[in-house]
């Protein structure tokens, strides 16, 4: 598909995308924007929010609008890796018994792993390996996953008992960590209007798979100035030393992710260049799951966003 | 080399800016030098230097004292040292120009620097960005890069000091007047410069260069004497003093030969015109008529 044609249409594509999703999902505009940015960057998202905020609804609506194959994995402590990747089953064909590979839910374009912190570390590893390699190895065979491929994992901050928190090395594989908060009173009124009265709305497809792949290619073409690149590097390096509340800082994956997501945000807003505002907005979802707080900071109840805000003011001023 | 249009526009602007900045810097250095020069003169540095070196240079009929030249050289050097030690340092002209344009034109903010940093890259979006920037650059005027305030301050200083310099200032003429009274036999002190006092200059007798001749035409160096009179001497400060004091040395005796005499011819002076009132004209005419009648 011609990139120039796609660029000319990109404004209209994004407008239609948001309009269609907002028919079903009320509010959560920032979270929605960040999820779409992650999709444009071919990155995976970790969504954190209390139950009932529309995490699953948002992702399933997104898959319908993007005309992508969607699958949901409800993570439980007894979930096995084969339940995610798939397994060989014995099948009788023409009187003979043969092994046939039955694809698991991971063989989709958008995979929702609900409450990933409830799955055992072994199951988590299987999922995370598929996320990283975009392929599944079973026995001697390797199965490539279809493009585009996104994993949107959710975490429930309340029910932490009996859970297996993701290790830091695994958290780094998620491009963004998106926080979903409670709706405002006005938004809640609209939610009631949509879901408690009358028929729930439905959505239509607005973006084809080819258009999405072209948009992903276009994101990498967005130019960025040398000054902003320097600022991104300074920002990430600042998390590694000089901040007493941070025990471990962000890796170079954070620098790559910040520039890529800033480019995607610029394209989403119809700009042909990356601005400082893009860096400032994307710093939070990029860094909040990559910086490990010290015990003292956790004891004081300091949150990652607070420290990120402080680092941003000192570096970008 | 980048093929984008805005790159050549920026390069052209950069070349013009470098040239203009050089002229403006020169003007500001000159104004600073003149200001320092005026301070030095005001505090008597010129007088001190003049007491050590009373030489002068004549350029096109204008007399320039060595002390003035030294003072001006010192002020130029001090002006350069002050400029070098100042905090302002233009680091990179191109970056400076780009920052300046982005500051004055909101449409080009962040766009221009992004386009400039990606000028060597090919791509659809880079091309689109460069087109937007080229369009925005049409609103940029070269006059935005000239600091009018700095220019006005420099011109004001130059004009003010020039005006002050041509106004008579007692302190500046001190060394010159003192030297003059010294030459005429005074001690060179300020007391002797009182115009009410008489200054007596004695003429030495003119002498002849021929040895043994009683008729002396040329002789020892003579200094004019004005007896029982007062001299009102006005000396203007600044370049080109109207009083020339030379060291008076003994003249050399030379042999002169008698030259043939030439008939004296009275010729009318063509450039001279005399416009006398009619009554005066008649008076003079009658005077000469009577004089000629008397001689017959």
Image (spheres, coloured by chain):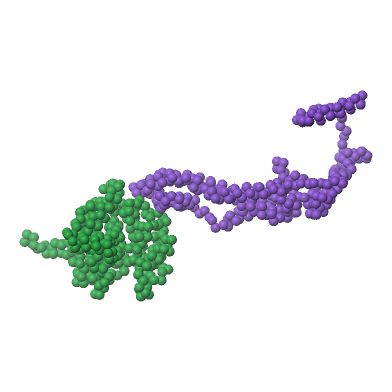
Residue at 90% across, 39% down: B216
Residue at 32% across, 66% down: A289
> Which residue occupies the foreground of this view, A89 or A48?
A48
Is residue B98 visible in the rendered image? The answer is: no
Image coordinates for residue A119, horizontal then vertical, percent: 23, 70
Is residue A86 visible in the rendered image? The answer is: yes
> Which residue occupies the foreground of this view, B112 or A58?
A58
> Which residue occupies the foreground of this view, A265 or A213?
A265
Q: How many marks?
A: 0
Residue pushed farthest front? B279
> Which residue occupies the foreground of this view, B178 or B2?
B178
Image coordinates for residue A123, horizontal then vertical, percent: 22, 68
Please identify the quadrant where the C terminus of chain A is shown: bottom left
Left or right, A64 with respect to A258, comes to left
Residue at 67% across, 49% down: B164
Give the vertical position of A206 relative to A155 (above or below). Answer: above
Residue at 73% across, 47% down: B236
Image coordinates for residue B157, horizontal then vertical, percent: 61, 50
Give the vertical position of B149 relative to B288 (above or below). Answer: below
Chain represented in green: A
Left or right, B88 with respect to B4, comes to right
Left or right, B51 with respect to B10, comes to right
Image coordinates for residue A143, horizontal then vertical, percent: 21, 60
Q: Colour of chain B?
A: purple
């Amino acid at each position: 598909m011609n990139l120039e044609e796609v660029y000319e249409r990109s404004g209209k594509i994004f407008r239609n995308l948001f309009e269609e999703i907002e028919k079903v999902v009320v509010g959560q505009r920032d979270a929605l924007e960040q999820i779409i940015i992650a999709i444009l960057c071919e990155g995976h998202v970790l969504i954190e929010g209390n139950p009932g905020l529309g995490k699953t609804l948002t992702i399933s609506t997104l898959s319908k609008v993007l005309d992508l194959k969607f699958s949901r994995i409800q993570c439980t402590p007894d979930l096995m890796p084969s339940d995610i990747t798939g397994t060989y089953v014995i099948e009788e064909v023409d009187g003979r018994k043969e092994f046939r590979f039955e694809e698991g839910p991971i063989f989709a374009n958008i995979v929702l792993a609900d409450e990933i912190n409830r799955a055992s570390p072994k199951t988590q590893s299987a999922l995370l390996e598929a996320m990283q390699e975009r392929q599944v190895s079973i026995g001697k065979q390797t199965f490539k996953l279809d493009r585009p491929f996104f994993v949107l994992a959710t975490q429930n901050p309340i029910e932490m008992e009996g859970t297996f928190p993701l290790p830091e090395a695994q958290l780094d594989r998620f491009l963004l960590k998106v926080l979903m908060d409670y709706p405002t009173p006005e938004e809640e009124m609209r939610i009631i209007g949509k879901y408690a009265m009358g028929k729930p709305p439905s959505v239509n497809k607005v973006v084809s798979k080819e258009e999405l792949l072209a948009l992903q290619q276009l994101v990498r073409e967005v130019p960025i100035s040398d000054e902003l690149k320097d600022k991104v590097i300074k920002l990430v390096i600042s998390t590694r030393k000089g901040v007493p509340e941070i025990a471990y800082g962000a890796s170079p994956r954070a620098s790559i992710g910040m520039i890529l997501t800033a480019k995607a945000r610029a394209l989403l807003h119809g700009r042909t260049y990356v601005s400082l505002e893009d860096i400032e907005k994307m710093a939070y979802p990029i860094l909040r799951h990559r910086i490990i707080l010290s015990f003292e900071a956790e004891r004081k109840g300091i949150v990652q966003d607070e420290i990120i805000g402080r680092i941003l003011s000192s570096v970008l001023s | 080399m980048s093929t984008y249009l805005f790159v050549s526009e920026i390069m052209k602007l950069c070349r013009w800016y470098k040239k203009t900045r050089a002229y403006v810097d020169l003007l500001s250095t000159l104004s600073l030098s003149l200001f320092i020069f005026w301070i030095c003169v005001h505090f008597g540095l010129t007088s001190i230097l003049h007491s050590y070196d009373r030489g002068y240079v004549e350029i096109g009929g204008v007399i320039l004292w060595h002390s003035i030249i030294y003072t001006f050289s010192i002020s130029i050097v001090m002006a350069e040292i002050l400029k070098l030690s100042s905090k302002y340092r233009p680091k990179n002209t191109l970056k400076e120009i780009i920052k300046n344009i982005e500051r004055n034109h909101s449409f080009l903010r962040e766009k221009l620097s992004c386009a400039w940093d990606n000028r060597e890259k090919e791509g659809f979006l880079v091309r689109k960005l460069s087109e937007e920037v080229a369009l925005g650059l049409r609103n940029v005027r070269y006059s935005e890069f000239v600091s009018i305030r700095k220019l006005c301050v420099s011109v004001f200083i130059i004009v003010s000091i020039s005006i002050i310099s041509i106004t008579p200032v007692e302190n500046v003429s001190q060394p010159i007047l003192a030297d003059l009274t010294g030459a005429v036999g005074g001690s060179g002190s300020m007391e002797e410069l009182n115009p009410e006092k008489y200054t007596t200059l004695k003429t030495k007798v003119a002498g002849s260069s021929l040895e043994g001749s009683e008729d002396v035409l040329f002789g020892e160096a003579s200094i004019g004497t004005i007896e029982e009179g007062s001299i009102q001497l006005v000396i203007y400060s600044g370049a080109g003093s109207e009083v020339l004091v030379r060291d008076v040395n003994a003249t050399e005796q030379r042999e002169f030969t008698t030259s043939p005499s030439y008939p004296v011819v009275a010729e009318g002076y063509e450039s001279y015109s005399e416009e006398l009132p009619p009554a005066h004209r008649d008076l003079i005419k009658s005077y000469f008529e009577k004089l000629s009648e008397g001689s017959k």
